[in-house]
Image (tube, grey):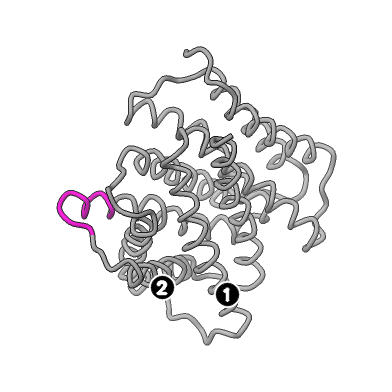
Amino acid sequence: MPRKFDMLITAIAPAVWGSTYLVTTELLPAGYPITLALLRALPAGLILLLLCRRLPKGVWIGRIALLGALNFSIFWVLLFVAAYRLPGGVAATMGATQPLIVILLARLFMGSNIRIMAVLAGFAGLAGVALLVLAPITALDPLGVLAGLGGALSMAAGTVLSKKWQPDVPLLTFTAWQLTAGGLILLPIAVIIEPALPGLSMRNMAGLLYLGLIGAALTYAIWFRGVAKLPPNVVSTLGLFSPVTAALLGWGVLGQVLNTAQGLGMMLVLLGVWLSQKRPGKSL
């Protein structure tokens, strides 16, 4: 029961993240991926840091910088690029490649066994991705696809290393460190590369508040809790709820058409989640 409860709580985070694609495309100004990623990470991180009142020391400074880059800086920039260049559901499903990447990285960084059941779960999710992505809804932008896959790789590496490196601090402190580090890394890049944001409307501000407070501070605290309590492949497979949520919101809010193949893809994604929580079984 505790493991199922941990999975249920952790699944809230990617389910909410699925809505960020809709928020990005509908509420935020287009063409500022780095600046928007910065505004999502840094304010949320600083708010949590003020509450926690503790900074990383020693070896943790470098580790937090790397985790902040992988989980936020690189991941979010590529996420925004994919969201701008692809339909929301397609952009979200790129992240469903994470479970297979996590299996390989967990083997490389942590020496974890490659379990047959975990591989089957990963391929079930990948099959669901293929059905959702290859459905004839629109032409796929190659740069958008590469950005989505690159973001999945960055997040997968961040998930594995967050599991490997567990500081002796409260969960909110660990989240605050990473969000702040990710935002600070993005700050000079945004200033140098991108033009200044235009005047933000109330609609834009609402989108940024949602992404920062709900889509970052709250959900990443939930996510890192799951990373600490569950195996990496199980956590990453729960991330498959994100594309399902995005596709359903695209259908329900934006009127995007879902065909039979895409429905089957969603079922395969859910099958992958179910397989990931089964007993590990044999190793390859």
The span from disc 1 to disc 2 (Cα, nearest Å) is 18 Å
Asked whether 57 or 259 is in front, the reply is 57
**58 in the magenta segment:** yes
Residue ID at (33%, 29%): 110
| Left or right of 234 in this view: 243 | right
Q: Which badge, 1 or 2, comes first in the chain's sequence? A: 1
Q: Quadrant of the N terminus?
A: top right
Question: To which residue does mark 1 refer?
Answer: 29
Nearest-to-viewer mark from 1 and 2: 2
What's the amino acid at mark 2? Answer: Pro
Q: Position of residue 65 (x, y in %)?
A: 27, 55
Q: Secondary structure at mark 1?
A: loop
* Residue beneath the point at 78% across and 44% down: 136
Residue labelled with disc 2:
43
Label 1 neighbour load within 10 Å: few <14, some 14-19, many 20+ = some
Question: Tags 1 and 2 in contact by the CB under 8 Å rule?
Answer: no
In the depicted structure, whether residue 9 falls above or below residue 237: below
Q: Name the residue located 69 percent from the left edge and 36 percent from the top edge.
A: 270
Residue 92 image point, x, y percent: 61, 50
The boundaries of the magenta stretch are 56-64
Q: Residues within 10 Å of mark 2 (few under 14, many from 20)?
A: some
| Residue 101 falls within the magenta-colored stretch | no
Frontmost residue, 110 versus 277: 277
Q: Position of residue 142 (x, y in %)?
A: 57, 47
Q: Where on the picture, by quarter, is residue 39?
A: bottom left
Query: From this viewpoint, which residue is outermost toward the left?
Result: 58
